Image (spheres, coloured by chain):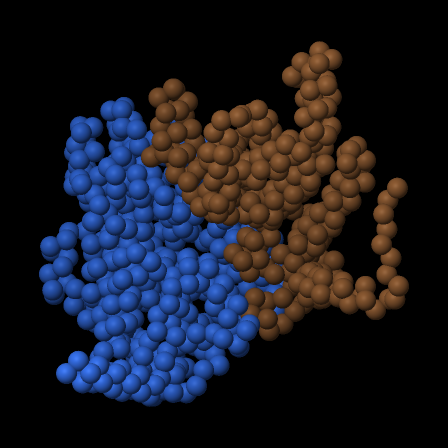
Chain colours: A brown, B blue
Amino acid sequence: MEKRVTFKGIWLPILLVAPQIAITAVFFFYPAGQAIWQSLFIPDPFGFSMQWVGLGNFEFLFSDPFYRASFVTTAVFSILVTVVSMGIALYLAVLADRLIKGSGTYRTLLIWPYAVAPAVAGVLWLFMFNTRVGVVSWYLGQLGYDWNHVLNEGEAMGLVVVASAWGRISYNFLFFLAGLQAIPKSVIEAAAIDGARFWTRFRTIVFPLLSPTTFFLLVVNIIYAFFETFGVIHTITSGGPQQATTILVYKVYSDGFVGQDLGSSAAQSVVLLVLVSILTVVQFKYIERRVHY
Amino acid sequence: MKYTTSIIAAGAVLCSTQAAFAQTEIEFWHAFTGRLGELVAEQVETFNSSQDEYTVVASHKGNYSETLNAGIAAFRAGEQPDILMVFEVGTATMMAAEGAIKPIFEVMEEAGAEFDQSKYIGSVKGYYTAADGNMLSLPFNSSTPVLWVNRDKLEEAGIDPDTDLSTWEQVGEVLDQLKEAGVECPMTTAWQSWIHLENFSAYHDVPFATQDNGFGGTDTELVFNSPAQVAHISAMGEWAQDGKFIYAGRRNEGGANFRAGECALFTESSAGYAGIEAEAEFDFDVRPLPYWSAVASEPQNTIIGGASLWVMEGQTDEEYKGVAEFLNFLSSPEIQAKWHQDTGYLPITTEAGELTRSQGFYDENPGTDIAVIQMTAKEPTSNSKGLRLGSFDQIRGIIDEELEAVWSGDKDAQAALDSAVERGNALLRRFEQSSR
């Protein structure tokens, strides 16, 4: 039986949600409205004039094969970042959960990378994989592998994925560990007594009980991969080689702030807005059903 | 005793703030860091201490693109600086923004300052001059691409370090020899679009875009997919496949490899001088940019890269007077000659070049005048005055992408350049629409 608290009047609840609504209106609805409005024009950079083009900006975008390709790039990138960062984090969390001695140190060390800003992380990884002076690329060279993410699209994608996922592992790790520790020991012990091995226990008990955490992290990580990996991509590849690592958000930046094409940039933000809304709805409608709270 | 000193000190501080108050402040936003940043600060300091009416306040606003953005954003907010540094590819954007900028010839005229436009070197000022021949902005740092040679590397490979490298045909032979001798990086480049397409076109007197490379109007179209450019990119692509040309990145990443002594040849701006001079532990040499003797019997001139200073609209007359004085100070032969010698950027006036020569700088540093000669030896044609294309920063991005496809062997030169032209033209049409 769910507990519901009901207010008597109408004014108190309105008063209570008002600050939240005000903040959303000022910092979300207003700029989003502006973006939608601007996406219907081609303005000049200095703001003197605006040419009404209706849906012209969208037509221009979708007739560009590189823009369409950017959707695929974004999907590949987001899925990889999410899977890599969550997979490794879950693995480490399971290990940490079984640890009895020194777990504090272990945890602290694992959380460290989270404090590194994406742009800085980008520079660090770039330096390690620099084609001429990077440590890792040198070792790879010794092994007979010629690393060149400047020209090789797959390697470039791999590098930005790793650099973006790396900082994220800490964050995911924290949540997974907390989730694991919240699972009642008695349930696991009972299963163990029934003869379930570690893997069976994990698959049938731990993972399902962990699903609220996993679901939360899935949403958060996809949003992270969509919007916050900008710094990493900017510092490592600037969207290249060719457009192999130009994800949608990066294109918004490069068209708007390098190309001074604010109309197209606004149209792209609108497309992103729609895309993320759809994605979130899908996640909550279909995936959440399978989550056990 | 202690107190007296502090009272005097406090008094001095008060007086000095008062004095500063009376001065007109001139805001100058630039994009320089490191050694160049120090040199700009030095120029500003010299100007500030040379007179007491104006104080120039220089602020660093990020790289070129970021500085331009900061200027645009500030203008939209009504907080624009007096002087904004804009890189050469932003020129068309600034020119189209009539209400945002105040042409420099107007600033000078209204301030009653002395301004003789004929003092400025034609091929430098041409990039920033309106159709009526008046200068719209002041060229600040201008450079042009040259060929840097690691003499030690050539010698190690058994090649005469003084060998003639004036044509790409000759360079091709040397690359073969370097490769055979086991040199891992026979050649690399910086700024591939600027050097191997934009300058290449001017140098061989072939158009980069219609309408005199955009000087004639915004209805310009890119045409750098003609046989001359395709042949060059094709040759470079083959060299890349054979490991004779090593691609390091879109900007000047290759510079690190050259300065570390890994690469034998390096096409880079003449302004690479400061860095190479400081870091190279080998014998190096500057040569003119090579040309294809199959395309042209002799080279035209190269064009510039770098930035110019734009005066923004909406300031007081008093500030504009100060701006005029500061810009004239920057153009003075002594300041220009020092800048030219310190950085490898071109002198913007003929006088500064002559002063440098008479100071014996070129004799002591052979090759430092090559860029100047390469720029000024011939009267520029409509193909070699420069480029004036909207959204050009982005078009360069497209060119970078397509060239990368050639270097990696994904596309042949013709297909890549065709695609770059088509994609670039779409952006030019949008720019035309936005500036209507």
- Residue A198: % across, % down: 65, 17
Quarter of the image for residue B36 reads bottom left
Q: Residue at x 18, y 29 (%)?
A: B156
Quarter of the image for residue B132 reads bottom left
Taking B403 as reference, is B94 above or below it? below
Kindly give the residue lying farthest to the top in the view shown: A195
- Locate the C terminus of chain A and report the quarter of the image it occupies: top right
Taking A106 as reference, is B430 above or below it? below
- Residue A284: % across, % down: 78, 41
Taking B281 as reference, is B240 above or below it? above
Q: Is residue A147 left or right of residue B395?
A: left
Quarter of the image for residue B380 reads bottom left
Q: Residue at x 32, y 47 (%)?
A: B268
Tell me if I can see residue B335 in this picture.
yes
Q: Is residue A223 left or right of residue B88?
A: right
Tell me if I can see residue B138 in this picture.
no
Q: How many marks?
A: 0
Q: Residue at x 53, y 25 (%)?
A: A99
- Residue B33: % across, % down: 33, 58
Q: Is residue B199 left or right of residue B183?
A: right
- Residue A123: % across, % down: 42, 43
- Locate the N terminus of chain A and report the quarter of the image it occupies: top right
Kindly give the residue lying farthest to the front in the view shown: A186
